[in-house]
Image: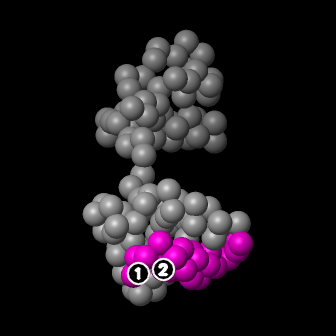
């Protein structure tokens, strides 16, 4: 009885996912519900965006939490978009800050980028 319930629950989950469009068309499964072919080559990742935005990379990669930190990230992204800051400077400072601290990389990023921007003649 448990095997039947487990098989029917798996079938329900797979059918629901297929109806919602998580999978492409389900392949014919000669081995029944339990065989691995039910999940083979059915996921299509072509609809997902390939590159995250600079704002997402900075916010998540630097573990921004406070409103002031998100505001700083927004200001940096705007300055990159207006070509006041180079993307290379932001990316290299981002990587440096992540190497300096895994727990609080935002602090290093903010201080480092402000110093580098000041040296380049840009007021951040």
Q: Is residue 77 visible?
A: no
Residue 76 found in image quarter? bottom left
Q: Main secondary structure of the magenta part?
A: helix
Q: Which residues are magenta?
A: 100-124
Camera-nearest residue between 62 and 117: 117
Structure colour scheme: one colour
Q: Residue at x 57, y 65 (%)?
A: 94
Residue 75: x, y in percent?
35, 75
Q: Image quadrant for the N terminus?
A: top right
Q: Is residue 71 above or below residue 23?
A: below
**Residue 102: in magenta span:** yes
Q: Image quadrant for the C terminus?
A: bottom left
- Residue 118's mark? 2
Q: Is residue 68 left or right of residue 1?
A: left
**Residue 28: in magenta span:** no
Q: Residue at x 39, y 81 (%)?
A: 123
Q: Is residue 103 left or right of residue 26?
A: right
- Which residue is denoted by mark 1 in the rendering? 124
Q: Is residue 59 left or right of residue 98?
A: left
């Amino acid at each position: 009885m448990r095997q039947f319930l487990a098989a029917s629950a798996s079938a329900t989950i797979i059918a629901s996912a297929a109806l919602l469009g998580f999978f492409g068309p389900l392949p014919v499964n000669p081995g029944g519900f339990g065989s691995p072919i039910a999940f083979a080559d059915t996921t299509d990742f072509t609809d997902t965006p390939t590159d995250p935005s600079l704002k997402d990379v900075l916010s998540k990669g630097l573990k921004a939490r406070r409103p002031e930190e998100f505001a700083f990230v927004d200001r940096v992204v705007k300055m990159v978009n207006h070509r006041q800051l180079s993307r290379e400077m932001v990316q290299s400072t981002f990587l440096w800050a992540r190497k300096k601290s895994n727990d609080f990389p935002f602090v290093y990023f903010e201080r480092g980028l402000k110093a580098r921007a000041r040296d380049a003649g840009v007021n951040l």
